[in-house]
Structures are given as C-alpha cells and as structure tokens.
Amino acid sequence: MTSTFTPSPRTARRGVAMLVLAGLLLALPGTTAPPAGAETPALAVPYQLVVDRDVHDRLASPEDRYALAGGCYTMQADDGTWVARDGAMVIDGAEADAVPFHFQPTRLGEYLIAANEGPDDSVEGAWWDVRSYLTRLSVSTGGQPGLPAVTAAVQPSLADTPSVRGEWVITAVGDDADARDEAGQAYEVRSQDSTLLGTYTFHHVPDDDPTDDDPNGTACADWPEVDTNTEGRPSANPAGPAAEVQGFFESHVHGMAFEFLGGEARCGRPWHPYGAEFALVDCEDHAAGGRGAVLEVAVSGGDPVNGHDTVGWPTFGYWPRHDSLTHEQYYWRWLERAYLGGLRLSVNLFVDNTALCEIYPIKRNSCNEMDGVRLQAERLFELQDYIDAQSGGPGEGWLRIVTDPAQAREVINAGRLAVVMGIEVSELFDCSEFLDQPNCTIEQIDQRLEEVHDMGIRQMELVNKFDNALSGVTGDGGATGILVNWLGQRYTSGHYWDMQTCAPTEPGHSHEHDKTQINVADDVPDGGQEEIDVLAGAILEQFAPTRGYAAPAYSAGPHCNTRGLTPLGEHLITQMVARGMVVDPDHMSAAAQRAALDLIQDVIIPAEHERAHAVGRAPIQPSLISSHSWGNDEIYQRIYSLDGVIGARTASADRFVDYWAERRQWAADLAPADSLFGLGYGADTNGLGGQPGPRSTPAVALDYADGFEAPVGGVTIHQHTSGVRTYDVSVDGVAHYGLFADWFAELALAADEHRPDLGGGDAIIADMLNGPEAYLQMWERATYGSNDCVTDGSHLQTEDLHALVGGNVEAFLTAVGQPLDRDGAAYTYCATDDVGHPVEARVTFDADGRVATVDATPVWALPRD
C-alpha cells in the first residue's frame, strides 16, 4: 500500500470514538431497537437477521408457532381427541382418523389450514392438489328488542375456498405467544376475531408416510406455488459479516408499484396471503376476453378486437411478457429465483404520479404521491413479513430491508438479499409548482425529509415526469414526449417544458442535453431510438381530456430545458447529504444535473472537509448514483469522477454489454485511483419500462440441458416453469423478474461473443458482482466518512481503535470511518501510535462481526509533508 501521511497531535477523533462506543458497543451486531412511539415503517419494524434451523427440517412437533409454515401436521386436542372429518364436516376422532393438514402461512403466525381433496385435474400438467379449508362457521341469532344480535360459534367445516373465516391465528399456550420448545408444546388456535377454536398439539406427518394414498406423493395437499427451479441455497460468507460482498446489484426497481396510480392500473401483485392463485390474476377491467384492456393495448400493442388470454396462474397464456407493462412481473417467488441466481442488493423505489392517477379512471388509493410512498413502504414491510412467515419466523427470510450500509453488508454476507428503500415521484414532498410558483417551503421540505428518513428511505430522485419546485425535468422524447408535455406537464404546472435549442457549450459537454422534442427541423428526434418509458404517455393518450390548447412548436434540437435546479432543490440535496442519503440525479434536466453536481463538488465537499478537519473526524463523501441511465453521458462521467456508482438501464444482453464496456472505460479514466468499479443494472420492473427482450441472433444460446451455476452462492439454475408455463430467456426475454437469473448468464455469453478483448464473460460478471460492494463503499463514505492517509491534520490513534475492540461493525465504522482497504474480515487504517509515529493498523473482525484484534505496524517509509 502506498500513501502519504502527516502525523499530528491527538485530535477530537478519540472523543468521537468514545462517545459512539458508549452508545453502540453493547448492541447486537447490526441490530437497532426502534424508538418508543415510532409510527413510520422502518422505525416500527426493527431490523432483524435471524439464523435458525431450516423450516423444512421438521421436528416431530413444531418448536414454535412459525415452524408450522408449509408443513403437514395432524391436530390433537387437549382432551385427547384428534381433528377428523365426515365429508365436509369437522369432527372429533381417533388418531387413525386424524386429517393431515397443510399449514400455509398468510402472515407471521397466521395460517390457512388445508385438507387434501386429491389432484387438480382441471389443468393439464398440474402437480398440485385441490384443497378444502378449515373454516369457522357462525350463526347470527336475533337478540331481544333493543339489544344487539348475538353471533354464536359452531363446529368448523371444510370450505372450498379460503376466506377470512378460514384464517387462523396460532399462539403458544401461556404468556409468550412466541414461546419455543423443541420437545413440542400446546398451541391455541383462534379465528381472526379471537374466537378460540381449541388448544392443540401438532404432529408432523412425513412426506413418505406409509398411509399416504395421494398419487401426487404426499398425505397433505401439494400447495400451488411458483417454483424457483433451482438446487441449493446460498450459504453465509465464512469471512463473517464485516467482509467484502459479492453479487448482482439492482439499482432501480418498483416492486410495490401494484399500488401506484390509484392501485388499479396494473394487474396482479407480488404476493397475496392466499398464494399465487390470488396474486397472479388479471385486472378486472380486462374482462370479456381482454377486450376491455385499453391501457394494455396502448402500451403493449395488444389486439383491441380479439383481446388477450386473461388467465394468469397457472397457464400464463399471454402474460407475463417482457413488453407488457400492466401485468405483474415481480412476484415474490420470481424475485427469489433472481436472488438465487446471484442478486444480493436491490434498491426498491416507491413510485407514483398524481397527474396520471387523477387521469386514469379506475382507482382505489389516494392520488397524492407521498401517500403512495407511505403505502408502498408499508407493503414492502408486509412482503418482508410474508417471506419471513414462509421461512420459519421473524428475521429468517431471505429478503431483509436495510437502512444503513453495515446492515446491508451483514445481510449480504449472510447469503441473503438486502433491500434499500428509495423514492421516484414527480412531486416529491408535495413540492409541485404552478406557473413557477412553488407549493412548498424550506421548512416543509425539512419536515418531510425527516419523515421519509425515519421511514427508512435512503435513496431519492428529485423529479420524475414533470417540472417541480425542486428541479426542471429532462422530459420524454418522441411521441411520448408530446403526450406527457401536452396533457401532463401543462396539467400539473400550468406551462409546457421550456425546451430550447441548446447553446454551444465548452469542449467535453456536447452531449449535455435533454430529450429532444419533435420539431420541424429534425426528422428523427433522439436518433430514432424507441422510447422504453411509454406507460405515462399511454395513460395520457387514452384517458386525459383534451386540454384545449396546442403544444408548443420547438426549434431544432438538441434541446435543453431552461429550468434547472431551484434554491429549494439545492437545499434538499444539501440536507440529503447531511443525512448520508444517496442522491440520484436521474430525470433532472441537464442544467439541473450539472448544477447539482457543481453544488456537491464545489460547495458541499469543500465545506465538509473543512468541518471534518476542525473536529478531527473522517469527512463525509456525498453518494451519487444514476440508477437507470436517465441522464446524459457527461453526467455519468462526472458521477464516476466523484466516486459514485451507475446502474445501467437493462436491455437485451448484447446491448447491455455495450453499456458495460462504455462505463468501464469511463470509470477507468475518471474515477479516483483506489475506486472499485462495480456495475449495477436498473430494470425499472413494474414501473414505467419494459424488460430486456431476447437476443436477436446469438451465436450461442443459453443451454438449459444440465442447468447452469449461479456465479455466486453455489446454486444450480434450471429452466423455469411457473405453473404449467415454461420460459426460455432466448425466446421470451425477461418475461418476469425470475428470468434475470437467466439474463445474468446471457450477459456472459454476449460478452464472450462481442467483447473478448475486455475479458469476455468472466470480466463482465466480475464487474457486476462488484456492484453491491461498490454501492456499499459509496454509502459508507456518505454515512461514516471516508479515510485516506492525508487528512489535513485529523488523524486516528491506535488507542482509539483498541478502545473499540468488542464493538460491532456499525459501531466501529461510525466511530472511525471507512477503512482504506479490506481483506476478508480485516480492515486497514492509517493511524498514529502513542508517540505520534505513523502506523498501518490492521483491524480484524470475528465470525460474529465484532472487533477482535488491532495490530499496528510502524510505517517509517511513509513520506511526510
């Protein structure tokens, strides 16, 4: 390691370290308790990462109420009788007559209890069974005059369909509902209104039960669910939670967008308490054979006369498709397949648009964008809980929502998927503008920023479709631009985009412009590239009333929006940086993007270095990302020069290889010398964009014959089947999110074919597997401060490091900042010893992620200023 170092007297850094140590040293690794009275999701749901026995490794009786998940059990009542059946009626019986029930989690500790009614013969190729559901019956008896009616519970029966009366809350008997006993224990089973069904012990029925006569192979009903078609599960990094991470990085996805635009514009949802049969369904307005699907026809080129196959699960005759923007593509089991294929870090952006919501005629949710953000945040935590419920209990699922880089590092090193929450809306914090008059104040911005930060939001864009009080927008091009400008921009702001022919710029800024609008002088705006982001334009075209005014006639391109970054936008960026949040300039006008990066580079960074020097701490380095390539080449290059990260917009594998090669060169030319290059991908799934289509003429197609290995995690990926529909990425493209596991493999094939000079498939996969680490290092610099060996007189002492022995990763980084280097579970820092001599300090962490040792080696050869 080569560096320059200037020793100095002790500074206030030691005091900072000790203060942080006092508050964090004794905390569990990566765990933060929520403040009392917290109401927003991230504060109300504490971060948990639990390692427990695999829920599928069944004990004779479940050790806690969560271990029932997905299992087959008989039920013995506390009076010694067993739950049996007489047709559809549930009766008390002997052990030999006990019904084996499948326990399907709907939420944590809540279940559908299903009996096996034999194979489902209604669908050719079905491997699942028909089920009946233990359901509480009740009768209402009229009360005396003037008194309320009385509802009396009666013996439960087996119903054909699940319902709220068949959702059962199961708790351990006693004061602790979550009590755990591997020897087995009794449980109370109650309905949703807390009516007690009874007290039971549960007895596991193994899959090879000799009394089983079900031709599908199990005594219990085989539950209809999407398979991941994989072998193996990722294991934890043996280097521990503090080590460097690897995996693929999704920088821009809208997993909870089933709730946006009023909640009825998209069909299906990522999960449903009752499973795939209820989650993967078409929209109600697509009835009559799909001929009512006006929006689907507009955005996906559907047939308005003949319609489309509206059946989702299990046949999927029409959808999901890579080019269908109104049908669910982010079902939780599809996401799990992508995770098993190597995805380890994902930024889930909450998205909404007031104008499009108000224009779209069908809705059930508020059209206020910040209401949409709050609702989608709740839904994401519900999804995390749902996955936990399937996995054996709180904190045990493969998906974990994280709010700081130490949590994310711990999650990924545990072999799981870390999810960061973000925002992409047009009226962030209700900061719209009308005729250039802002509808928010600095005080309101500060209050609302604090709210979303408490909610757990860590990455934000300032603008999306329309100019707002924070920034001008880069706009949409082509025909979509006409519609968005004419029917949306004017509707929200009272004016059109002020796109002018860009003025001549200095060398190096020739591509710094916005989306070129259709005009008389240019034959084909924006090079004739087909617009991916068409949903906004389609909604406006189909449902917006004519406004009674003509769109402006623009001069020749390239075009630049005259509206740039406003003083309110400058204030927001400054406050985001102060909170360690990640700034995403995507969708901002070129002028606004340039002003934002000027602000960070010329004002925020110098001021922060001065403050850090004054108090002797590691300076904060603002985090910058272009999450889905909605900017211009100059901005992408400046982001690299400021040690930021880029997530390239997904495309066919061949085209994405070109994006990789270009960004790789930019990073090599412009990023700081010690910067790690890692490339993310911004799929925009479930939002406003299509997914990668199939490769046009691949020299070698992906071979599914023997499966293929995920590049990280040790999982074997096989060709995917959802229900009875089999997918091939070479034919279907990324029809749903699970096929990103296949797309990752296609990238390697495409790079071998097109860029062997850069190292081909091995090189692109290596760079993409560095994506999470590059993002986390950037986020660490923004959260804990960055370190180098020239810190303007602010230096770390070895005794400060020794004082932190026993602390967890988060406590350590908060106290001393990001290391200069990582090697497995060892971090390297420049420090001074007790007499002021420069040393290289090596800090090692144990398997639990706590500081174990600090070794300091004198570095006499380091040059001095």
Image (cartoon, helix red, strand yellow):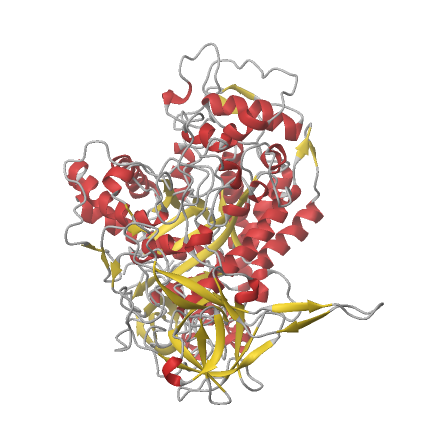
Between residue 383 and residue 607, name the one nearer to us.
383
Percent position of residue 655, x then y: 28, 34
Q: Is residue 754 visible?
A: yes
Percent position of residue 145, x then y: 84, 68
Indicate the quadrant containing the C terminus: top left, top right, bottom left or bottom right.
bottom left
332, above or below 478, in the image: below
In the image: residue 304, left or right of residue 844: right
Between residue 688 and residue 730, name the one nearer to us.
730
Between residue 161 and residue 596, name the one nearer to us.
161
Identify the residue shown where x is 37% and y is 56%. Answer: 333
Identify the residue at the far top of this view: 520
Between residue 604 and residue 588, name the one nearer to us.
588
Where is residue 246, by image quadrant?
bottom left
485, above or below 373, in the image: above
Where is residue 465, by image quadrant?
top right
Identify the residue at the far right of this view: 146
Total numbered badges shown on the rendered structure: 0
Q: Is residue 590 visible?
A: no
Percent position of residue 352, x then y: 56, 42
Indicate the quadrant containing the N terminus: top left, top right, bottom left or bottom right.
bottom left
413, above or below 745, in the image: below
260, above or below 33, in the image: above
Percent position of residue 431, x then y: 65, 40
